[in-house]
Image (cartoon, grey):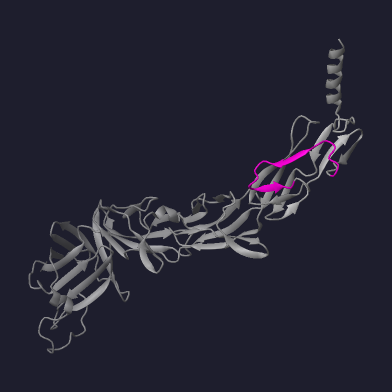
């Protein structure tokens, strides 16, 4: 019985607490570090304070007497160390670990966070001006031993861009321009409360269509290619969607255009294709010309039933609405007249009309009928019929000469039409 009573007393003494020298110690109701997070610079030291509630008040633990036999340790000794004699913490490596205080007088270990943080951590740039498709790596700088140095340490930074349609960034901090516009690079490390940030701009320096005009047959489709300059080299924009484009066609009766920039020719005529993008200050344009039965080069073969003018009148009607008239009437060469023409439907007939470069209209409007390689024009005022045959206009006609040079210049003449 005496043995059992002695054992019970020993247990009670243990619960109440007993010092090394036999002095009874009250068990603290609450133990904590003064700070939940200790931020330490690399190779710097800090002295943590342990607080405990004994009786009615909270007091700072006296490390010199260490009555409760507290064992102080660091979970990851590669990041920080703690001196057994002074209980000072030294930052050894950038990172996060835990400071742990243990004693026989409390059950659960008391912990606090240790953060060995980089002083003056910053990005090498606060503004990145990139070209589409370009990739650059983020540079980091820190201050160590009073000097700013570049570092390859990534500090567990989690990177992101605010608009991934403009630029992306991988886990290693490599930025890639995938579109046009502006966004921000943001990096967050658990070692610091503030974020790292920089502006990213992917600028479109110039923009143009590959061709000033496109000539199509009815029903034909084309997606005009877009060009820009990158690194001083002219390149094709492979994915126009990165421009956030808005496509417009001036005459949807001539051709249509999809949101992807695909043009479909409908009927003969000309229309202006326009591209607008928020990434370029001005709209760009190109001409869509759709060939018609009347498009091409023609020779007057009969006029009012007479073949006397055959070989002396030629005309080219272009798909873009322009014409060239070549004529040799009482001259030794061919005079050329240029302008624009239109074809309109009136009372079920196609009517051809034109205007010369100086603004003078044709003398007549013509009801037009195209059948294969023959085009018949009937004057609306006097019903005179002109018949044209499809041909290739000879070079000497376009050169303006029918004989060797030196036989005289072409005299001023009135246009045939």
Residue at 70% over, 46% down:
114
> In the drawing, does residue 34 fall left or right of residue 319?
right
Viewer-closest of 312 and 52: 52
- What span is colored magenta in the figure? 64-83
Residue at 19% over, 64% down:
296
Residue at 83% over, 21% down:
11
Predominant secondary structure, magenta span = loop
State the image quarter where residue 63 is shown.
top right
Q: Position of residue 223 (x, y in %)?
A: 32, 55
State the image quarter where residue 248 is shown.
bottom left
Viewer-closest of 74 and 119: 74
Viewer-closest of 356 and 367: 356
Q: Is residue 398 magenta?
A: no
Q: Position of residue 39 (x, y in %)?
A: 72, 50
Is residue 18 visible in the rendered image? The answer is yes
> In the drawing, does residue 278 fall left or right of residue 303?
right
Q: Quadrant of the N terminus?
A: top right
State the image quarter where residue 250 is shown.
bottom left
> In the drawing, does residue 280 fall left or right of residue 102?
left
Q: Position of residue 188 (x, y in %)?
A: 61, 50
């Amino acid at each position: 019985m005496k043995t059992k009573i002695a054992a019970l007393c020993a247990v009670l003494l243990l619960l109440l607490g007993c010092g090394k020298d036999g002095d009874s110690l009250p068990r603290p109701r609450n133990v904590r570090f003064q700070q939940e997070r200790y931020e330490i610079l690399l190779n710097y030291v800090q002295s943590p304070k342990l607080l405990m509630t004994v009786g009615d008040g909270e007091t700072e633990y006296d490390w010199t007497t260490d009555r409760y036999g507290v064992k102080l340790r660091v979970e990851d000794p590669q990041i920080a160390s703690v001196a057994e004699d002074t209980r000072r913490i030294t930052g050894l490596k950038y990172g996060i670990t835990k400071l742990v205080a243990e004693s026989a007088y409390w059950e659960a270990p008391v912990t606090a966070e240790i953060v060995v943080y980089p002083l003056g951590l910053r990005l090498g740039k606060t503004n990145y001006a990139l070209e589409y498709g370009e990739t650059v790596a983020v540079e980091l700088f820190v201050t160590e031993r009073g000097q700013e140095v570049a570092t390859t340490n990534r500090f567990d930074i989690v990177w992101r861009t605010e608009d991934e349609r403009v630029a992306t960034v991988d886990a290693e901090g490599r930025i890639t321009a995938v579109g046009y516009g502006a966004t921000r690079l943001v990096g967050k490390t658990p070692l610091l409360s503030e974020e790292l940030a920089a502006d990213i701009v992917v600028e479109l320096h110039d923009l143009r269509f590959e061709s000033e005009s496109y000539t199509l047959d009815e029903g034909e489709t084309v997606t005009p290619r877009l060009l820009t300059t990158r690194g001083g080299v002219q390149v094709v924009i492979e994915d126009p969607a990165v421009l956030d484009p808005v496509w417009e066609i001036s005459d949807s009766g001539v051709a249509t255009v999809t949101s992807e920039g695909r043009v479909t020719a409908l009927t003969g005529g000309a229309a202006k294709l326009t591209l607008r993008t928020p990434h370029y200050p001005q709209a760009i344009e190109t001409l869509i010309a759709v060939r018609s039965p009347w498009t091409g080069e023609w020779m007057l073969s009969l006029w009012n039933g007479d073949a006397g003018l055959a070989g002396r009148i030629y005309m080219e009607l272009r798909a873009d609405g322009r014409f060239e008239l070549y004529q040799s009437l009482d001259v030794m060469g061919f005079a050329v007249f240029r302008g624009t023409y239109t074809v309109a439907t009136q009372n079920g007939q196609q009517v051809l009309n034109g205007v010369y470069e100086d603004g003078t209209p044709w003398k007549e409007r013509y009801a037009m009928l195209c059948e294969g390689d023959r085009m018949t024009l009937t004057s609306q005022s006097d019903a005179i019929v002109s018949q044209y045959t499809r041909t290739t206009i000879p070079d000497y006609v376009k050169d303006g000469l029918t004989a060797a040079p030196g036989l005289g210049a072409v005299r001023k003449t009135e246009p045939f039409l």
